Amino acid sequence: MEYLLLIINDPEAPTYIPEEDNIEEWSADIERRGIARTGNRLRPPSDATTVTVRDGATILTDGPFAETKEWVAGFDLIDVENLDEALEIAAAHPMARFGRVEVRPIWPFEG
């Protein structure tokens, strides 16, 4: 089953310590296990544009759709047996210590 790990920047999390950031090891582990599908960093909210269409008019808004201190900093798509395994993988991600990792199952369209 596929799960999306949303990597969340959280300004209230413990201070980021570069020496403790083991993202290369984490990435190599999920690659070696054959569960990595894709993943990447995202540019900060200041580089975002939100697109809304109302009554046939396209409205473009700078930044994210909500005012919040937290923001999505990246993502990883994994394919694992179950939620427990997805949670184990998420807990090992360095941003689980320096931010947050939201785990969401992929909900495929039917037919």
Image (cartoon, helix red, strand yellow):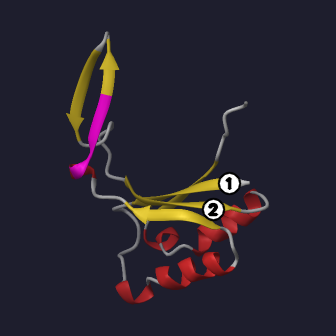
Q: Residue at 74% across / 54% down in the picture?
A: 1
Please state which amino acid type lies under the numbered disc 2. Ile
Count up the numbered dots. 2
Q: Is residue 65 above or below residue 39?
A: above
Q: Is residue 77 above or below residue 95?
A: above
Q: Position of residue 81 (x, y in %)?
A: 79, 61
Q: Is residue 109 above or below residue 103?
A: above
Q: Which residue is mark 1?
A: 2
Q: Is the residue marked by circle 1 packed among few (<14), some (14-19), or many (20+) residues within 10 Å?
A: many
Q: Position of residue 47 (x, y in %)?
A: 22, 51
Please state which amino acid type lies under the numbered disc 1. Glu
Q: Position of residue 7 (x, y in %)?
A: 47, 60
Q: Which residues are magenta?
A: 47-51
Secondary structure type for disc 2: strand
Secondary structure type for disc 1: strand
Quadrant in the rendering for residue 49: top left
Q: Which residue is mark 2?
A: 78
